[in-house]
Image (cartoon, helix red, strand yellow):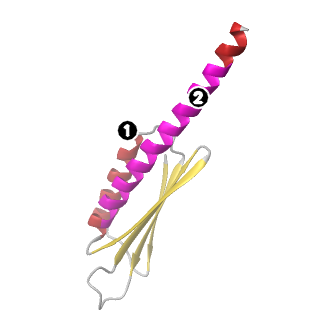
Amino acid sequence: MKIGIQAIHFTADQKLLAFIQKKVNKLDQFYDQIISADIYLRLGNISEETNKTTEIKLMIPGSTLFAKEECKSFEEATDLCIECLRKQITKHKDKVRLHEGKHKELANQQVAT
């Protein structure tokens, strides 16, 4: 999987980038056909407490999954995004399995007749 990380309006340190890379790579455990991931880190108003936003866009065959979270830290926002994407991946896999199952049923019915 190809991972691109962009920090908007600030420079992210290596520890943060490594943390995000590690978390996004764990999504491969749930779905091995992920093509790429684009991660955007934004720093909002300094006056607000939850001013750190993480956006993750996953490209998978036939679809694009997206999650956006705003928290006190980028690590927390990344964790929430990963959890959201994990749920979306599970839902997508269930849809694909259901679709494939229907095709197999139709193929079996056509062979039987």
Quarter of the image with the C terminus is top right
On the picture, is 111 further left or further right than 24? Answer: right
Looking at the picture, how far across and down is residue 63, in whole percent? 59, 49
Magenta: main secondary structure: helix
Q: Position of residue 14 (x, y in %)?
A: 31, 64
Q: Nearer the viewer, residue 74 or 10?
A: 74
Q: Nearer the viewer, residue 39 or 101?
A: 101
Badge 1 marks a residue whose secondary structure is helix
9 in the magenta segment: no
Compared with 83, 96 (above or below) is: above
Q: Position of residue 56 (x, y in %)?
A: 45, 61
Q: Residue at x 38, y 48 (%)?
A: 86
Label 2 to label 1, Cα distance in Å? 21 Å
Mark 2 and mark 1 residues within 8 Å of each other at the beta carbon: no
Give, as a three-letter code, the residue at label 1. Gln
Q: Is 90 part of what is drawn in magenta? A: yes
Residue 29 has which mark?
A: 1
Q: Nearer the viewer, mark 2 or mark 1?
A: 2
Q: Secondary structure at mark 2?
A: helix
Kindly identify the amino acid type of the residue bearing the numbered disc 2.
Glu
Residue occupied by mark 2: 100
Q: Quadrant of residue 62?
A: top right
The residue sitting at 49% across, 45% down in the picture is: 1
* 54 lies above or below 8: above
Q: Which residues lie in the magenta part? A: 77-106
